[in-house]
Image: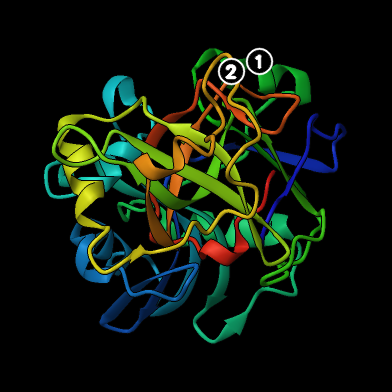
Amino acid sequence: MHARLVETLPEGDDWLYEVKLDGYRALAVKDAGSVRLLSRRNNDLTADYPAVRSAVAGIHAERAILDGEIVAVGEHGRPSFQALQYRTAHQASIAYYAFDLLHVNGADLIGRPLDERKARLREVVAGSGVLLSDGLPGDADSVTEAVRRLGLEGVVAKLRASLYEPGRRSGAWVKLKLDKQQEFVVGGYRPGYGTLDTLLVGYYEGTDLIFASKVRAGFTPHARADVFRQFDGLHARRCPFVNLPSNRTSHWGWGVTEEQMSEMRWLKPHLVAQVRFVEWTADGHLRHAAFIALRDDKNPKSVRRE
């Protein structure tokens, strides 16, 4: 089930508010002595997160399916998506936050209200090592302000009576992003530093890949080399962006002119990057874009401008 993006949170006692966690969305499936962790693209993540696997094995159910987020806790105790990318070094700080329970011991719960699923979830994960993503006290404004003050990514609001709708974005769950960031498709780069200097990213409108920004900030030397390694086998002869070259480049260099096209190297649009930015400009580019990490849990074709 997916959350619809909103600019303000809905208000009222019918809504439950939770912290929007910055990690990998995953189903945790326990079947007797077996545990599997499955991404949104149905990739098996089990071997990558042994601490999470062990925690799920300890829940109070023989068989269950949990919905939640694999999160790496970085500096100052905040979720860090970059830390999650380098899971070997940060294994001890990785945890699974469960926010829903879909099945337990043969009982299908997706047709039951969220409040009922949450109550069962609380019992199932108690003391197991699986952490509970529970409701936050307060109204929409106080919750938003508290989450903003803590420097967290955002808030998810869910109707307490909502049923679980797999694969849908019905509006029964909504999300408010306080930190402007989203996924973008990587379509090229400018070489530099022996690897890459700048990423070229965009999003889909229908079947067209639209150029959105150059992304140069946010790279550590390690991340720069790691991203560059992902380009193996993806080089392409032609630019995949339908709106390049630009007619002109702006004062901040957002566009790519005809003269600059020869400096770029093009890629098949198979990679997805998480990018932080200040705002969208009037001409449809990102201002002050910074790289966070690559995401292998996102389908490039599903990336749209949020």
249 vs 275, nearest the viewer: 249
Image quadrant in which the N terminus is located: bottom right
Q: Quadrant of residue 136?
A: top right
Proximity of marks 1 and 2: CB atoms separated by less than 8 Å: yes
Q: Could you say which quadrant of the image residue 60 lies in?
A: bottom left
Q: Is residue 248 above or below residue 67?
A: above
Q: Residues within 10 Å of mark 2 (few under 14, many from 20)?
A: some
Question: Going 68% across and 67% down the picture, which residue do you hit?
Answer: 207
Q: Secondary structure at mark 2?
A: helix
At 38% from the left and 36% from the top, the residue drawn is 292
Image x and y of residue 11, in percent: 86, 31
Residue placed most toward the observer, 53 or 291: 291
Percent across and percent down for residue 213 are: 53, 35
Which one is in front, 246 or 305? 246
Q: Give the quarter of the figure containing the C terminus.
A: top right
Disc 1 marks which residue?
Answer: 145
Using the rendered image of the protein, determine whether residue 139 is visible from the camera's viewpoint: no
The answer to whether one can see residue 235 in this image is yes
Q: Which mark is residue 148?
A: 2
Q: Amino acid at mark 2?
A: Arg
Instruction: Residue lying at the far front in this picture: please name it.
Output: 259
Q: Position of residue 124 (x, y in %)?
A: 46, 62
The amino acid marked with disc number 1 is: Glu
Q: How many marks?
A: 2
Q: Which mark is residue 301?
A: none
